[in-house]
Image: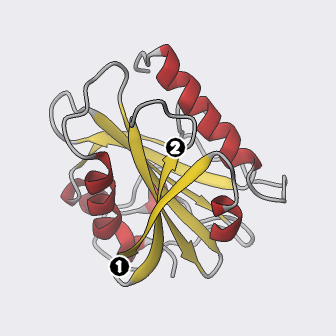
Amino acid sequence: MRVVGGRRLAAACASALLLAGCGSSTQGVPIASGSSSTSGTATTAVASGPGEPFDPCTIPKDAVTASGLDVSTERADFAGITTYPGWKGCTWDGAAQNSWYYVAVLSSMESIEELLRSPSFVRVSDLDVAGRNAAQLRHADELQFLGCAVALGTDGGLIVLDLQKKGSRELEGDACAEVNRHAADLESFFPK
């Protein structure tokens, strides 16, 4: 596990707590810590069990790589936490050697409206991701911009892509532009 700066870890943990508590339901499914992406290039979402959110670790490895993420860093957690009631997630580092960021793809059966009502996020703008309505978000508690998120609604919940800079690394690009690119690249693998 990488060492993460204190303020960044606190922000990541706050994000985790927000995600765990933003919905009205506290019944959840633990995220399998041993999940890994499947290979192939199918453009359909892989269903989880009945009543479970989509598992982002089922996004094909070649699609993750094509988007510029490093599949060798795949982990079914976010900030070292593997269980959020009602959520599933998968995290990858950027593919560049010594990448300055990681992207967590998180899925819930909660609605995007519930997430957008949370005081922990600031809605920056509305945007279109491969023909889907989405919202650009920032964490409300950030004193400086450390990352950026995109939330997309689905028929059965929502998908959040949360890009954050790693530890004490400097921002080496526009976090929102990067997460928007990853969202567009991976959108066809998300539930509709």
Identify the residue under disc 1: 43
Q: Is residue 70 above or below residue 136?
A: above
Choose top left, top right, bottom left or bottom right for residue 109: bottom right
The residue located at (51%, 43%) in the rendering is 76
**x and y percent of residue 134 in the render?**
47, 72
**Residue type at the position of mark 1:** Thr
**Residue type at the position of mark 2:** Ala
| Res. 78 visible in picture | yes
Give the Cα separation between the discs numbered 2 and 1: 21 Å
Sequence-first disc among 2 and 1: 1
Q: What numbered label is drawn on residue 76?
A: 2
Residue 56 located left or right of residue 116:
left
At mark 1, the secondary structure is: loop
What crowding class fits label 1: few (fewer than 14 Cα within 10 Å), some (14-19), or many (20 or more)? some
Q: Is residue 163 above or below residue 24?
A: above
**x and y percent of residue 20 in the render?**
72, 46
**x and y percent of residue 9 in the render?**
52, 23
The residue located at (44%, 65%) in the rendering is 125
At mark 2, the secondary structure is: loop
Choose top left, top right, bottom left or bottom right for residue 50: bottom right
